Amino acid sequence: MSSLGTQKVIVADDDTYTLKKIKHLLEGEGYDVRVAFDGEAALRLCDKYQPDLLISEINIDGLDGLSLLQKIRQNHRLDNMKVIILTSSHKEGNEVRAFDLGANDFLYKPLRPNAFILRMKRKLATTKEEKKALSILRINGLELDSDNGTLIKDQAPIPMPRRTFELLFFLAQNPGVVYNRFELLDRIWGNDATINGRTVDVHIRKIREKVGRDYIVTFKGIGYKFNSTYATVSK
């Protein structure tokens, strides 16, 4: 997800007029907007940019809007992303199914610009507040700031590569939960085909070199967890 600065929005629609109109409206409010003409392209953009919000039509090529929503809700890297359906389809059952799949709002075309902007601002303001609340973890001498990717131990800054930091932050958010290598690869590296399970081991070793061995527990042949005895967390 984006930092607490410019928030990212992806718009998926096969109607050029709608795409241009929404892009113009949101960019006028200061949002970073990218567009996709089909569902597959939208899914790739979401995985690459991890936006704060997706706005999608249902009737789009390749992967329809509801199938796109379903795939997004199955991708844990996009857990905090809001999804709004904006559609011209009045097919019975679409709205119920969209909410069942995890949509945050459901709107019908034609677009009403003023009402639309107000609803977008509310959704994105909520996202911003949620991210701010979750952006800093303080755990027994460690302070992890996910917005800036910074780590402090016993009041001293510790430099750490971004992916290594993201791995530590994720484990620290879920103390006591054991994750296997493939789960961690999916969470942190997504669809990057250039990495494998040994990559996780390398980054775990880097974490231990930086903060000590006691924070991360190895379950041989299974995976890793953040030591629950270090789980006194303040945010």
Image (cartoon, rainbow, N blue to C red):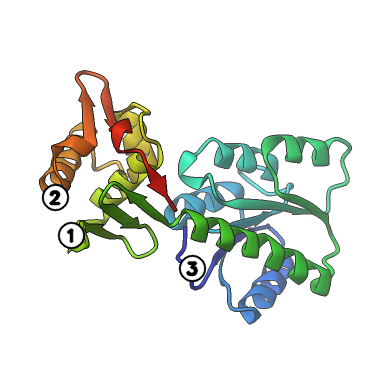
Q: Which mark is residue 210?
A: 2
Q: Residue at x 68, y 45 (%)?
A: 65
Say what amino acid the circle numbered 1 marks. Answer: Ile
Q: Amino acid at mark 3?
A: Leu
Residue at 33 percent across and 32 percent down: it is: 228
Q: Amino acid at mark 2?
A: Lys
For the residues labelled 1 and 3, the Cα–Cα distance comes to: 22 Å
Q: Secondary structure at mark 3?
A: loop
| Residue 158: assigned label | 1
Give the x, y percent position of residue 101: 68, 36
Q: Give the CA separation, mark 2 to mark 1.
A: 7 Å
Rendering quarter of residue 16: bottom right
Asked if residue 228 lies left or right of residue 1, the reply is left
Closer to the chain start, of discs 1 and 3, is 3
Q: Is residue 191 visible?
A: no
Number of the label disc, if any, that sits on residue 4: 3
